[in-house]
Amino acid sequence: MTRFLVASLITVSLLGGCAGSISAPSKQELESSGASEGVNEQESLTEMTPEPAPDWTQAASPNDIEACKIPDPRPRSEQVLYRGVRQGGVIGRDPVGFTDWRRGGLLPIDGKMNIIIAKIAWEDAPPSASIPDGSLELQAQKMTELGHFWSQGEFTYQFQVVEGWVEVPANHADYPISAGDDVDHSPEAYAIAAKNIEVVSQMVVENLPSDLDFSGADIVVPVWSHNVSAFTMPVTWRGGGLRSPNGQVTDLIFMGNSTWMHSYLENTWSILAHDFLHLQGLNEHAPAPKFATHIGGQVTPTQEGWSALIPAWETFLLGWFDDSQIHCIQAAELTATEQVILTPLEEYGGERKSIVIPTTDFKALVIESRRPVGYSESWPDDFSGLLVYEVDTARDHLDHGENKCSNSRENPKWAYYLLPDGAVEADDCNSPAPYFLKPGMTLTDSGVTIELVHSSENADFVSVAPADE
């Protein structure tokens, strides 16, 4: 039996900080706490009253949005190669800049994406009690809610959840998908495993319930029994041609994670989110993939300081921001201070979500406001303020890698976080803490000075001025 699931949509109050005033304590409260002893009461009240927000009006962007759509400079022959596809000496990566012909990837980014998800066991890897009934429904609901939040209601992850277990009448160990004990994402490793990946994908699909809507589905996602041990590499098939139980030839993509997922069952929703975005056309893995500041990092969702949000630049690439939510400032044309009020990424919607500052033909500075709430609620309290990074659409990009210091320029990436003026790298080179721009701090780069003038619960007041002003 199959269940269709589209989760009820979450409300802003669950995922974002709620706006509200912060009042100073009363005289009675001060006296009862002893805080007024030996201190002028009026001075204490003044010190504890938050600074009022600047009386700013949100101005229109000084430049047209098209100026901020930094292009992908590669020839079309390279742009057509999806991530990981090899053609001659070129390994494909999805565009990190805008093209005049392509939005998205192999899976839809508009409307809805229909996903078949099922628990899969084999003769030599029977069902495991560690994946209880109802677990997939819960993960699907979380995934649907996340997609709604990312896209501001413009896109839906829709699931067909298969009840119970699908048991494939074969031994999975006869079809190992492995490159040793570690996950190997290299094209060479996938080339070796490709034959078994196709066979495993076909066996799973043809043993799914026949009442599923295969013609309406885009992708099949198996969740392996924890007794599966021979799939230490992801089982991803993008070649099409898989036959349904009714013999129908489909264009289905098959995306099965490796045995690494056994340890992260409760976070299936967030790991699917990362992998779906790859197939929807995002490179991810930048900026700073080990900073845990976004869903595209090479981190586990149990890591402290982890966030399930997409960086502002990639959200812009997908078209999930309205053009009006990007404040576009050409660095070369900036002659006076721009004042912009940014809504944190953790808040649903908002008038301005990011400032983009093109600096050269293929580079831009991107500014986003962040808070330790909602989909970043595991962050420490001081992970608050602005994050600023440089996007370079012409730069070489290493997908997976050691990334011991993930923001180091020695690691080829399409984006890097920038330090505020006077700040230094932390002893832990994978910590984002020094990169948060706090009220009163500035960051000068590429001829502009960015200042966080004021922070409130759900807004950052940002000035951008010529560096020599």
Image (cartoon, helix red, strand yellow):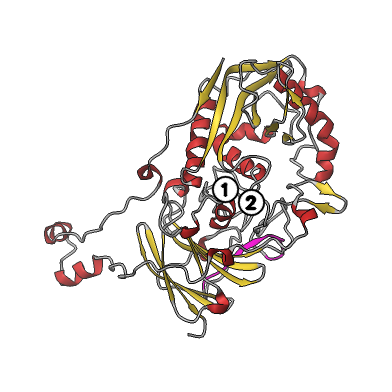
Can residue 38 be seen here? The reply is no
Horizontal relation, residue 213 to residue 321: left or right? right
Between 35 and 223, which is closer to the camera in this rendering? Answer: 223
State which quadrant residue 279 falls in: top right
Residue extent of the magenta highlight: 409-420
Q: CA distance from mark 2 to mark 1?
A: 8 Å
Element marked by disc 1:
loop
Q: Residue furthest right?
A: 88
- Is residue 111 in the magenta section? no
Label 1 CA crowd tier, 10 Å (few <14, some 14–19, many 20+):
many
| Rendered position, 7 above or below 280 | above
Quadrant holding the N terminus:
top right
Horizontal relation, residue 383 to residue 68: left or right? left
Residue, x 60% and y 67% (percent of image)? 364
Q: Residue furthest left?
A: 28
Tell whether label 1 touches label 2 (CB within 8 Å).
yes
Q: Which residue is mark 2?
A: 284
- Is residue 411 in the magenta section? yes
Q: Which residue is mark 1?
A: 295
**Residue 97: % across, % down:** 65, 59
Earlier sequence position, callout 2 versus callout 1: 2
State which quadrant residue 234 falls in: top right
Residue type at mark 1: give it: Ile
Q: Residue furthest bottom?
A: 468
Residue type at mark 2: give it: Glu
Horizontal relation, residue 248 to residue 427: left or right? right
Q: Magenta region's main secondary structure?
A: loop
**Residue 440: % across, % down:** 40, 73
